[in-house]
Amino acid sequence: MTNLASTAGFEPFASDPARTPTLDAIEGRLTGLGGLPFGETILMWWNFVARTPVEIAGAREDWMAGHRFGEVSAYPGRRLDAPPFTARAGAI
């Protein structure tokens, strides 16, 4: 078993080894990203990341219209529709 945290050069879960990510007899790749937090609030909904509900709604509209986002040519099925988006009260 490989301890993923120690192979990345740091021990984020050192105080709780039970929470340390591990790989068992599988083959694959792992990419870890990190850094300082954004200086603004970020919203995530379905496959979209934005700063405001208006930007999320715009991204959904662009996705549904086939604009701004690339095609996934390796997927054998039809393009997936984004579910309807309704901003929750109190969201930013």
Image: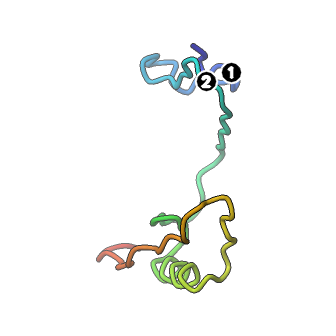
**Above or below — where is 13 with respect to 69?**
above
| Residue 15, position as x, y percentages in the image | 46, 18
**Above or below — where is 71 with respect to 11?**
below
Is residue 8 rendered to the left or right of residue 39?
Answer: right
Q: Which residue is drawn at 62% across and 82% down?
A: 66
Is residue 74 rendered to the left or right of residue 53?
Answer: right
- Reading the image, the residue beneath label 1 is 7
Q: Residue at x 68, y 79 (%)?
A: 68
Residue with the most extreme front position: 76
| Residue 24, position as x, y percentages in the image | 54, 18
Residue kind at label 2, given as amino acid type? Leu
Q: Report crowding for label 2: few under 14, some 14 to 19, many 20 or more residues within 10 A (C-alpha).
A: some
Q: In which quarter of the image is the C terminus?
A: bottom left
Residue with the most extreme top position: 1
Residue kind at label 1, given as amino acid type? Thr
- Reading the image, the residue beneath label 2 is 4
Q: Is mark 2 on a helix, strand or loop?
A: helix
Q: Which residue is drawn at 50% across and 76% down?
A: 56
